[in-house]
Image (spheres, grey):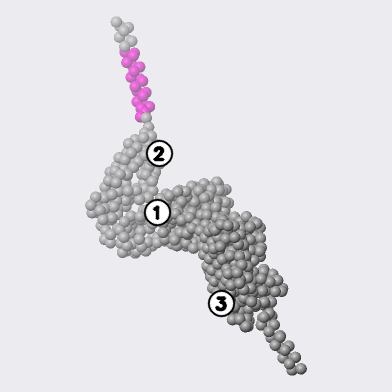
Amino acid sequence: MKRIGWLVLATTGLAALLNWGPPVLAQVAPTLGVAAQFGALGASAVTGSAAPGTVVSGDVGSYPTPTITNFPPSSTSGTFIIHRAADGVVQQAQADALTAYTFLAGQGGAILPGPAAPDELGGRTLTSGVYALGAANLAGSTALTLNGPGVFIFNISSTLVMNTSSTVTGTANPCNVYWRVGTSATLNGSSFMGTVIANTSITVGGGTVTGRVLALNGAVTMPTGGNTIGGCSAPPVACPIITLSPPTLPNAAVGVAYSQTIVASGGAGPFTFSVTSGTLPTGLTLTAAGVLAGTPTTAGPFTFTITASDPAGCSGSITYTVSVAAACPVITLTPPVLPLGRVGVAYSQLITPSGGAGAYVFSVVSGTLPAGITLSAGGLLAGTPTTAGSSTVTIRVTDGNGCPGTIVYTIVVAPAACPVITIAPPVLPPGKVGVAYSQQITASGGAGTPVFTMVSGTLPTGLTLSAGGLVSGTPSTVGSSIVTIRATDGNGCPADIVYTIVVAAAACPVITLTPPTLPVGAVGVAYSQQITATGGTGSPVFSVASGTLPAGLTLSSSGLLSGTPTTAGPSTVSIQALDGVGCPGVVLYTITIGGPAPVPTLPQAFVLLLALGLTGAGYVRLRRRARG
């Protein structure tokens, strides 16, 4: 009885050694994703065999290095394709293969028992399970038999080597067999079954591989022709057309921040964006979400291809060329001040750039335009304002090289009817360097409390204008500044005044202008009056500080007021003289121009006496003739 029990145990043990059953750990097939449609997938290259070539029943591709050689004479069968560029499908396949590799490693496995060395596969018959090996080897002319249903997983920590005439065969489904190889795989046997995912490279030296060969970091090489690979690859997914936009990208410039979002449509998002060929401008990067941004550092043209891939591995690509200019010029926008608008009245103002190159594109980068007014890409502000008020906006123009120019405008829209608003004083007093300055400007005639702003020019250094109209501060520089100050009432109705503010040296003499008053002129009669200045240093320079001369008259820099008046009426004008060190003298003149000179007429009594005299002379002549 003991011998029978021993014999049974011995027979069972021998059977276990020769036909080892499944390990304790349950096995789960990995999800291959897009990698499932590939027969041969490399990282650095896929090299087919020379004539008669290898036939691959599955897609062929390589990423990140898209090197595909000897196709033909090697080829793919059926509807499978060769990915000659590192497109989104190949990229996704590599990512999915890595995920499957990691998943297989996580399942561990049981070490194969003797009698052969644990890494020796030849001569074994196995059923489904997870097996762990160091460096797996099939000696020449040996066979590994895989029988039965279920999933077979081989976790090999280093190399897998099939020697000449060795085979992997059996009743197992080849598409349920997985080989995770820690380094490289060499398949030189006559037949092999399963999907090999190798961390580095895979060499298929001959025979038939029923499955897939997927290399994560190296090449797939097929040095011997006439063999086949495949049989488990799923046909490629029918992909929609994926379109990327915009069709072209704006140019850029060195040192100027750049940002452009690329959008994909047509597939099932979310999309993953990547550069699949060419080089981005130095300093720019592309995010996976499609944002191309950065600050260019190198001038020149850059051509590159961007690919968008969806989760199904479908992709679309577009090639862009972006020119990066060496440096940006100063781009100036005119006019410096925009005209006033009025509710219900059509408004149109063209903004003109200068200093850039190529076509200009305008946009509002901050603030909001008045309701009813829009800005075209060509720089035309137009529309019919609907609401009174004041709007401050920053408008940017970008030239053909991506160089920018900006300007800040305050656009005032007045009500349909506005009152006359008068700003006082008409002339601002001069200031002195280092001496505190304070002058209140007022506005009358409007509604509510006026708000004062600068619309053009620059106040002398050290002076500021408050919203309440106070010009104050301590001037620090000698000179003359011309500024336009606007008063806007509570209804948005505006009034502007132009001031010339003179800042003299710390100590200035009194400069007197003569004559104190100007003579009256007449329309159509030549007018000439020399104005002189005394008390300053050097030759004075005369100018109109505020107000307007009568039509037809001009003032020379030497102080000669001359011309022929064309319009009757009084004109109030402030004339200043600056001496050689910037010290001012100012006088306010009222110049009156009368109507045309009347035609001289004779007094009525004189006409009567003349008529009587002529009558008497005629009577005397008649008497003389009668006597004669």
- Residue bearing mark 2: 567
- Residue drawn at point x = 35 percent, y = 20 percent: 612
Q: How many marks?
A: 3
Q: Tell me, yes or no, whether the highlighted magenta stretch contains residue 614.
A: yes
Q: Tell me, yes or no, whether the highlighted magenta stretch contains residue 388.
A: no
* Disc 1 secondary structure class: loop
Is 534 placed left or right of 97 in the picture? left
* Disc 3 secondary structure class: loop
Amino acid under disc 2: Thr
Q: Nearer the viewer, residue 40 or 301?
A: 40
Q: Nearer the viewer, residue 489 or 621?
A: 489
Magenta residues, as a range?
600-620
- Locate residue 271, reporting x and y percent: 59, 62
Amino acid under disc 1: Pro
Secondary structure mostly taken by the magenta-highlighted segment of the chain? helix
Locate residue 529: give its quadrant: top left
Locate residue 113: give its quadrant: bottom right
Amino acid under disc 3: Ala
- Residue drawn at point x = 75 percent, y = 91 percent: 4
Is 111 placed left or right of 592 in the picture? right
- Residue bearing mark 1: 329
Is 527 placed left or right of 138 in the picture? left
- Distance from disc 2 to disc 3, alpha carbons, whole Å, reads 110 Å
